[in-house]
Image (tube, rainbow, N blue to C red):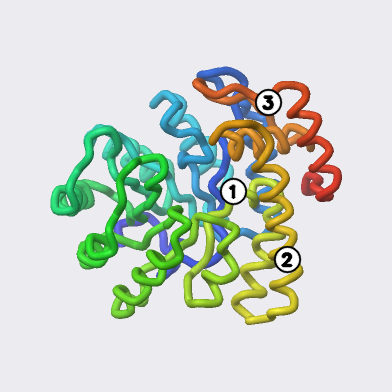
Amino acid sequence: MKSKSNLLPKPLCGIIPPMVTPLQDRDTLDAAGLERLIEHILAGGVHGLFILGTTAEAPSLSYRLRYEVIERVCKQVKERIPVLVGITDTAFVESVNIARKACDAGAQAVVLAPPYYFPAGQPELLEYLKHIISELPLPVFLYNMPSYTKMVYEPKTIRAAADFPGIAGIKDSSGNMIYFRRLQCLLKDHPDFSLLMGREELLAETVLLGGHGGVCGGANLLPELYVGLYNAACAKDLQKIEVLHEKVMKLSNAIYTVGQYESSYLKGIKCALSCIGICSDFMAEPFHRFRQEEHDRIQRYVKELGITPAK
């Protein structure tokens, strides 16, 4: 619709990795690492790329750095796959500014979680969506991430928002399959509305039950694994699904469980990427990279899981 190209399918299906942001320090990109990471992910056959989301540590990045990420990623991807840009912010105007930057750089869509900090009611949230979507130059994917935003897009709110011009779908990272199934039931009359699962451990059942794909953090490391699982689920190849799902769970149970805090998922992915020579493991504050003991555990898991950079 508003996109500069017809690159965005309706609905968007497949594996859309939420890419990490390689950093040298708190406000400097690891540019060489970013280039390697993009090519590593694309070599796995993914169907899109989501930047400036949770896995990208976007809320901790300056606007200048976010704009640089948008420019570099869109320039390198060159419309080989759709690029989705996270625009979540507490300030309405800043979300619009990031969206306009994404459009100018050549992205195909934006992704919007509820504005955090102030707890909005569902009627207020729906009115917010109505206002902001009219200002955005690209199709919008809603992002349900209640564990971090402390806000939920209730199913009825999503159903009402689906009628707004410009809403392309939702990424649900709640991990609540009942919620996801309710969305499917409410949106049966919107076949172009993309329903994407954020929790990769639920990818197979999501696709088997009619979902459109996943935004899988582990695809930073093993994109071909998640693409393979998605394809197996589309084909209803239960034997292959069982084998590949087990590999996804092994990665989740290893890489994401090192460390003591909720940041372990982010630290684990970045640390593993550094272990295979793709990019730096520097974390935006308030986080810090794993210390040596934890780094050594990740290094061991990487070897056991057979994770190597794409050639």
Q: Which mark is residue 21?
A: none
Query: Which residue occupies 21% across, 47% down?
Result: 132
Q: Position of residue 275 (x, y in %)?
A: 78, 34
Alpha carbon separation for disc pair 1 and 2: 16 Å
Query: Which residue occupies 73% across, 54% down?
Result: 250
Answer above or below: position of 104 versus 291. Answer: below
Amino acid type, mark 1: Gly
The image quadrant that residue 116 belongs to is top left
Of 215 and 181, the residue lying toward us: 181
Q: Earlier in the sequence, mark 3 or mark 1?
A: 1
Q: Which mark is residue 217?
A: 1
Badge 2 local density, few (<14 within 10 Å), some, or many (20+)?
some
Q: Position of residue 231 (x, y in %)?
A: 64, 72
Name the quadrant of the N terminus.
bottom left
Q: Which residue is mark 3?
A: 290
Query: Which residue occupies 27% across, 39% down?
Result: 96
The image quadrant that residue 156 belongs to is bottom left
Taking the view exactly as shown, the residue that stands out farthest to the front is: 260
Instruction: Report whether 248 appears left or right of 20.
Output: right
Amino acid type, mark 2: Leu
Q: Which residue is mark 2?
A: 244
Q: Earlier in the sequence, mark 1 or mark 2?
A: 1
